[in-house]
Image (tube, rainbow, N blue to C red):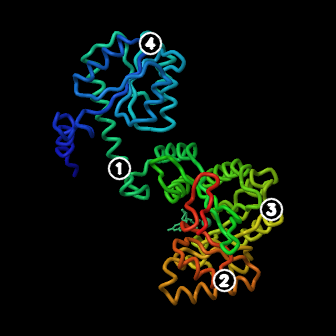
Amino acid sequence: MGRPTRYNIECDAMESEDVEALAPGGTRGRVLVVEDEDSLRRAYARILENAGFDVREAGNGVEAVRALTQERFQVVLADIALPCMDGVEVLRCMREWDLDVPVILVTGNPSIETAVEALELRALHYLIKPVDPEELVRVVVRASKLERIARVKREAVLHFGPSDRRFENLTALEANLVRCLSRLWIAYQPIVDYRRRTIVAYEALVRSNEPMLPDPGALFSTAERLARLHDVGRAIRAKVAHDLAGLPRGCDLFINIHPTDFFDDALAAPDSPLSAFAERVVLEVTERARLEGGTDIYARVRRLREMGFRVAIDDLGAGYAGLNYFAQLVPDVVKIDVALVRGIDHSEVKQKLVGSLATVCRDLGMVVVAEGVETPNERDIVSDLGCDLLQGYLFARPGPPFPAVVWT
Ligand code: G
Ligand code: MN
């Protein structure tokens, strides 16, 4: 049985004027008023301030966009007819960053076209001039409440994670993914030859400024649920290829490849973004994930090798992969997982494991990288145990292309 009274109680609470309903800062929320006519803008601002809102004013679209990048708003009220960049363009621009801020458009001469466009961009409301002050307040109050719901929902998703199926909404997930892809950037972390004090390569690590998908794990699990892993892989490789023009001379590039990417024909296409640089690129395959798709994957890896790519096994020591996998993949490089490196100076077991892994891999002609080196002790021990190359915060954190190393 449902309990409708509960919902009523919640609705009542939303309608009340208590402190709970106030936004941070003790006001009903921050409103951006975008209107080129000074007297009108001031009038809207005064009405909204009197109603308890914290108001910022913008005289044109460019100022509006600047304000939007500097502060978080609960509501945006924008005139449609603005010089340079009209209200609909401001709205389009906003939608690229923030799905949830409610926008109220104001127009002097309503037309079907702009109304339709406004709807498509999910404007919340469409006010017609002259605007009645009471209606203005009513609409803005309602918008700020909706924003508050969206904010609480967003926090819930952040806390319980996108894996919590109660929040699953494919359309919203898709929108998150699209925004995430448009705000994708690549951080690079040096891989060093410590003895020679040189950077020999950089690992590309995907990042996004999209708050709904804050880490690569969330990005990949969303893409997986939407069956769009290939799109993510392609977007990452395109970005990396773009950055490669600035890769310091003599450095190689390591890039993580999701196991399903091997079944994307675009990866091995002769005109793929990375193929022109194949000789400098090492494809990392994680040991954490099982390689599915049978033995076909090995044929695909062989084909990539023929194109000039090298292959690394990532996170060695962390996964399930057995010897067969190792033997079939014949990696050029192995990367020892951070779990074996962390605190190795205090663990004889870790020292034995890393020592034998490094010895065997080097015997097989593979280059050994130790990942996640954070302290000078860890650095010295893994070097002594035979790790040729090192990577970790001790040398540099991942950063925009291409971080330098301060040698100690
Ligand atoms: O699975 P893979 O090895 O590709 O993941 C690398 C991740 O490890 C990156 O997200 C990177 O930011 C992180 N990382 C890199 N260096 C260090 C380190 O020294 N310590 C820790 N804890 N994490 C690191
Ligand atoms: Mn990696």
Q: Mark 3 or mark 1, which is nearer to you?
A: 3
Q: Say few, some or many: other residues with alpha carbon within 10 Å of mark 3 (under 14 / 14 to 19 / 20 or more).
A: some
Q: Amino acid at mark 4?
A: Pro
Q: Are marks 4 and 2 in contact (CB under 8 Å)?
A: no
Q: Is residue 52 left or right of residue 83?
A: left
Residue 155 - label? 1
Residue shown at the point (32%, 35%) measured from the top left: 146
Q: Mark 4 or mark 3, which is nearer to you?
A: 3
Residue shown at the point (35%, 30%) measured from the top left: 75
Residue under pointer 3: 279
Residue under pointer 4: 110
Q: Which image quarter is the C terminus in?
A: bottom right
Residue under pointer 2: 386
Distance (Cα) linking label 4 and label 2: 73 Å
Q: Mark 3 or mark 2, which is nearer to you?
A: 2
Distance (Cα) linking label 3 and label 2: 25 Å
Q: Amino acid at mark 1?
A: Glu
Q: Earlier in the sequence, mark 2 or mark 1?
A: 1
